[in-house]
Amino acid sequence: MTAPAAHPHGAMRRKDREITDRSEIDEIIQANKIMHLALSDNNVPFLVPLYYAYDGTSLFFHSSSKGSKIEILKRNNTVCFEISQEQGIIEADKACDFEAKHKTVIGLGKATFVESEAEKIAALDRIVGRFTDRKFEYPKANLHSATVVKITIDSVKGKKHGF
């Protein structure tokens, strides 16, 4: 989905830095482990870093069933996420000309709570699989108390500089 130009996720100003190849955007998402998730509650922003997994169309994270992000998501499931791959600094002769060498993905989506035990296990396996090749079984009590959230991506953009 492409957002209208008036939307904050509209046309990119610096076309020379835009990543238009979806496979390159997917590579950035897969290569990193932390996303910053932005939420809004009564016009008050809330931002939280999270470990995540990606299945090619949706992002997943797990959480306690209590806390600010879960309560906000219950009231407003529209989210914005950011994933960055910082690669150092590009130095310059003038202080204002220093820049970051980076690749960044920003997307918008809708968050839903995963209820199915099989879907929860699949999402948790994806998340844990980003850190280890070991396989785990999840006790029923843990599955019951854990909250797994799926973010269906509505739109996504990529940007890079210094590559």
Image: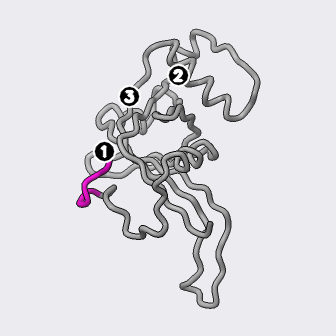
**What's the CA distance linking mark 2 and mark 1?**
23 Å
Q: Main secondary structure of the magenta part?
A: loop
> Which of the marked residues, 2 or 3, is nearer the chain's N terminus?
3
- Label 3 sits on a secondary structure element that is strand
Expressed as whole percent of the image width and height from the top left, the position of residue 160 reads 54, 63
Classed neighbour count for the residue bearing mark 1: other residues with Cα under 10 Å, few (<14), some (14–19), many (≥20): some
**Which dot, 2 or 3, sits closer to the camera?**
3
Q: Is residue 150 above or below residue 14?
A: above
- Label 1 sits on a secondary structure element that is strand
**What's the CA distance linking mark 1 and mark 3?**
16 Å
* Quadrant location of the C terminus in the rendered image: bottom right
The residue beneath circle 2 is 146
The coloring applied to the image is one colour
Expressed as whole percent of the image width and height from the top left, the position of residue 15 reads 42, 67
| Magenta residues, start to end | 2-7
Q: Is residue 20 above or below residue 1?
A: below
Classed neighbour count for the residue bearing mark 2: other residues with Cα under 10 Å, few (<14), some (14–19), many (≥20): some
Callout 2 amino acid:
Ala
**What's the CA distance linking mark 2 and mark 3?**
14 Å
Tally the numbered discs.
3
- Label 2 sits on a secondary structure element that is loop
Expressed as whole percent of the image width and height from the top left, the position of residue 99 reads 58, 75
* Quadrant location of the N terminus in the rendered image: top left
Q: Is residue 42 left or right of residue 60?
A: left
Q: Which numbered marker is on residue 41?
A: 1
Q: Residue at x 46, y 46 (%)?
A: 37
The residue beneath circle 3 is 112
> Which of the marked residues, 2 or 1, is nearer the chain's N terminus?
1
